[in-house]
Image: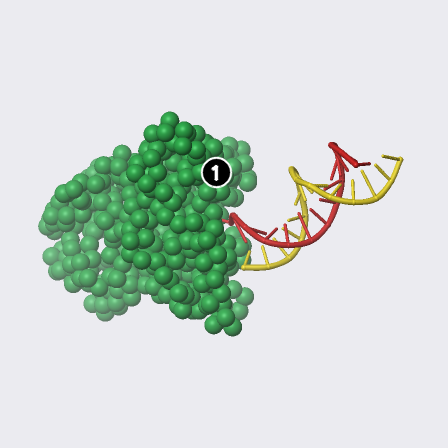
Chain colours: A green, B red, C yellow
Amino acid sequence: MAVESGAPVIPVFIRETSGRDPWSPGAASRWWLHESLVALTASLAECGLPLILRSGEVLATLDELIAETGAQAVFWNRCYEPYAIARDKTIKNHLTARGITAKSGNAGLLFEPWRITREGGGSYRVFSAFWRACRAAEAHMRPEPRPTRMRPPENPPASESLTTWNLQPKSPDWAGGLRDTWTPGEAGALARLDRFLERAARYAADRDRPDREATSRLSPHLHWGEISPRTIWNRIAAAAAAGRIPAADEEKFLSELGWREFSHHLLFHVPDLAEQPLRPEFSEFPWTACEADIARWRRGMTGFPIVDAGMRQLWQTGWMHNRVRMIAASFLVKDLLAPWQVGAAWFWDTLVDADLANNAASWQWVAGCGADAAPYFRIFNPILQGERFDPAGDYVRTYCPELARLPASVIHRPWEADSATLREAGVRLGQTYPAPMIDHGKARRRALDAFERIKSSAA
DNA sequence: TGAAATGTTGGGGCG
DNA sequence: ACGCCCCAACATTTC
């Protein structure tokens, strides 16, 4: 849009520092944002364009930029979070009233959240029906072509220096594992997609296996708009049409894009999704976890290897395999009886793919209070889940190295290993690795009892 | 996109 | 050969 007119283009990134956004980026997100802006600056420089960095209240900052440059038009990509919607609406009204063209577009979602509606209006609360409606809806899946020539500004406005934003951790620098794991930016995103397409034929079979590299790991790139879901959709569909990916794997992967759409659809229609349970009776749920229990969960010291491996993968790499997210989240909410908002807040701070819609919808799903949610009585058994999805224990060995020498037969239940096995593996429970912080069987029954109490109040 | 408890079935050991 | 019992394997129900 901005390019077609032939006028000079001034790419701008404004960092919101008004303090009004209730969900400003967490620590891992800030690291990603820094790296992503470095990559974007380099990418734009290849086209001869500067990236102007500003911080402040967004509308006031835009007014300053317009005054400095005489800009006639402002274009941006829509963000569908409640705060951003309200803010951008104000901006659009303000600019339009000033006689300045203000246009936003959608590169972040496949379907506009307001376009997919139930028969007779209203938004969906069940994924399968929502996704069926999406698949039936006409959608422009082709991404816009990359602009070829963009006219740079003759006198670009001043830019702030990225380093003064202090987005990266300094003392201590905990971002080493993130740097080793990720390449933020569009080029990194496209490389991830290429690598995923090579193994997408095993997606349906291996996607639940955290010990294998089976998922796309595109979530942070998607969140930051470094790649569009349309680009991903097209590449997957093309590979499937060419016979390189079986239809079952294609469908399974596209439906995961569908869950992402569903989450954004939900947040759009339920703006307090990140704060309040979708099922109101859960407001009365008797959460009892103490801060010490929650701290053990955060640090990956629960004594349940699959949970601890996941929490440490999160801490080290800013990401956790989806299957393990479900297991770790179920443990926090159901075994420890901690409110799902506590877990969501930790993920918000530590995930490089932290996304308000996905995070809120997924935590509510696990807790049983969300849309199309797992019923509350579905309680993951961390031992069985570990044995089923990390059968050799290799995922645990990677992130809990103190357990690495345990045989697969006991690696998910080290407290049941006989003393000789523990000794040979160099494991001393309670010293080198924690004893389980809770009896899962008892915790399960306690959770079901707690659930009974809100069930009666709901009727 | 669970797991545990409970119910059912059928093969085989054994008197 | 027959009935009885045990229990693994599978199915269904319950949480």
Q: Nearer the viewer, residue A435 or A19?
A: A435
Indicate whether A234 appears above or below A101: above
Residue placed furthest toward the top: A424
Name which residue lies at 26% across and 62% down.
A22
**Residue drawn 46% across the image and 53% down it:** A442
**Is residue A125 shown left or right of residue A104?**
right
Q: Which residue is mark 1?
A: A387
**Percent x, y of residue A82:** 32, 63
Q: Nearer the viewer, residue A205 or A228?
A: A205
**Residue drawn at x 35%, y 33% as measured from the top left:** A427
Residue A261: % across, % down: 43, 54
Q: What SS does tag 1 mark?
A: helix
Disc 1: host chain: A
Residue A387 is left or right of residue A359, and the answer is right
Q: Classify 10 Å Cα crowding around label 1: few (below 14), some (14-19), many (20 and above).
A: some
Q: Amino acid at mark 1?
A: Glu
Snapshot quadrant of residue A367: bottom left
Percent across and percent down for residue A9 are: 21, 49
* Foreground residue among A208 and A160: A208
